[in-house]
Amino acid sequence: MSLGLIVLVAVLISIFLGLYYFSLIISIAIWFPDKAKRKWVELTKSPGINAFIWFWKWVAPVWLITIAMSIAVITVKLVF
C-alpha cells in the first residue's frame, strides 16, 4: 500500500469522524438542551442549523445509531 493511499484513507476517516462527532453534539443539543453545553444549544438556534432542524432531529440520530451499530458488528466479526 502506497503512502499516498494511506494518507488519503486517514484524511477521509478523520473527516468522517469529525462529521460524526459534530452530528452527535448537535443532536444531543436539540434533543436534550438541559444536558448539552450552552454554546452548542446556542448553535442550534443559528439559521444554518435551524433551517435543517428536521434533519438534525430525525435523520442524524438514525444515522448515528446505524454507524455505531455497524462499527460494533465489524468489531465483533474481526475479534471473534
Image (cartoon, rainbow, N blue to C red):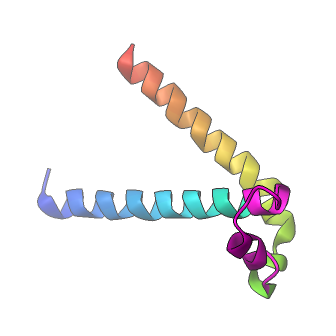
* Relative image position of residue 15 (x, y in whole percent): 44, 65
Q: Position of residue 48 (x, y in %)?
A: 75, 83
Residue 42 counted in the magenta span: yes
What residue appears at the point 84 percent right and 56 percent down from the top-left corner?
A: 31
Among the 4 quarters of the image, the one containing residue 67: top right
Residue depicted at 43% across the width and 20% down the height: 77
Residue 57 located left or right of residue 62:
right
Please, is residue 20 above or below residue 46 in the view? above
Q: Is residue 26 magenta?
A: no
Image point (76%, 62%), residue name: 29
Left or right of residue 6: residue 60: right
Which residue occupies the foreground of this view, 24 or 29?
A: 29
- Return the x and y of residue 71 as percentages of the image width and height: 51, 36
Furthest residue to the left?
2
Q: Which span of residues is magenta-colored?
A: 28-46
Classify residue 37 by image quadrant: bottom right
Residue 42 at what x, y percent from top left? 77, 78
Q: Along the line of sight, which residue is nearer the eye, 40 or 11?
A: 40
The residue at the far top in this view is 80
In the image, taking residue 65 as reference, residue 2 lies left or right, namely left
